[in-house]
Amino acid sequence: MLKGESDDYVFDPGTWLEEKEVKKIDLFILFGIAASSIALEDSGALESNFDPERFGVLLGSGIGGLPNIERNVTALNARGPRRISPFFVPGSLINLLPSHVSMRYGLKGYCNAVVGACATGAIAITEAARVIESGVCDIVVAGGSESALCRSGIAGFSIIKALSTKFNDTPQVASRPWDKDRDGFVMGEGAGVVVLEDYEYAKKRGARIYAELTGYGLTADAYHITAPHPQGEGGMRAMEMALRTANISPSEIDYINAHGTSTPTGDSVEIVAIKNLFQDHAYKVAISSTKSSIGHLLGAAGSVEAIFSMLALQHGVLPPTLNLHNSTEDSNVNLVPLVAEERKISHVLSNSFGFGGVNASLIFSKV
């Protein structure tokens, strides 16, 4: 568990829900409600003259209410079945996250949950775009949320040697994608939510547009339950599909927000996939992993990193890969080590890959 350098910000669920309601639901739902509220307020969509039946919610989680499940199973084993919470099941279900947001704001359009391991947030954004493109909704709240920082969550990832253990005394340097001393990821928690709209609809209501989602790709490795394909074949096809959807060439991508989890195998496989697809441009495009600064948010990673990507596009600042001192990759590949890089960019690619071989790639373009 990584404690931040500053304690100035502490998540307070009471900002969004009464205490009695907070006790009924898992933290991943609370994170999702909070992130959705912030996103909706920022978008101004609720102040517009919207049709609630064309306003959707598509949110997900990689694991769901694991801490809530753990607490209730502990109570069950210690004190019997009558001592578990009546909110055990509804407080843990993944689909209750979009349902809570739907009920909170009276959004009556397409409402569904996504479960895609560490690609969940990116898949939710992709599916939201498809819902809008199909004409079912004008606006969709989309993203992912996760809270698995509990005994069973830590133990489960530890037993498969996915987590870093080498830097337990200096956790701030434990997440180090592509560095030769990397030994696993650092688990984080939180939520990332965006508000997607039909472009003409957004322009008509005068919305502030951060970026346009121009491309997306979803594929499967069909290879292994936890390990990526050795050549990153599925990830490469997801990126290729996103480029095709966006109708742009690899050479037009200026920045890649990589999946880059800080695992010995996964980081290098992603670079192999990028090289195979981008060819010479792999040595010109900037690539970084924001997991080096916030850890791996599992089901929320894809949507949080989509937000990083859009803000990079808007501000022309590429987030760095922290703790990258000795790269295991080709020295000619720009992994934006240690320090942010200012660059005018037009198209960014965000990768999210998950257990089971699910791959999602998103392309955002400057408007």
Image (cartoon, rainbow, N blue to C red):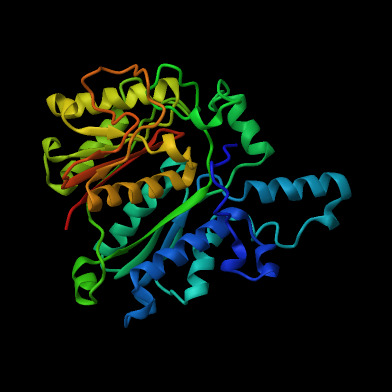
Drawn side of residue 115 relative to residue 339, left or right: right
Drawn side of residue 277 relative to residue 319, left or right: left
* Residue 34 percent coordinates (x, y): 51, 62
* Residue 278 percent coordinates (x, y): 17, 29
Q: Residue furthest bottom?
A: 49
Task: Name above or below for residue 18 compared with residue 211.
Answer: below
Residue at coordinates 15% horizontally, 25% vertically from top-left?
279
Task: Name above or below for residue 356 compared with residue 129.
Answer: above
Task: Name above or below for residue 263 compared with residue 254.
Answer: above
Looking at the rendered image, the quarter that the N terminus falls into is top right
User: Does any portion of residue 77 appear in the rendered image?
Assistant: yes
Number of numbered markers? 0
- For the residue pair 138 and 154, the one nearer the viewer reads as 154
* Residue 266 percent coordinates (x, y): 40, 25
Residue 20 quadrant: bottom right
Residue at coordinates 58% horizontally, 31% vertically from top-left?
157
Residue 58 quadrant: bottom left
Looking at the rendered image, the quarter that the C terminus falls into is bottom left
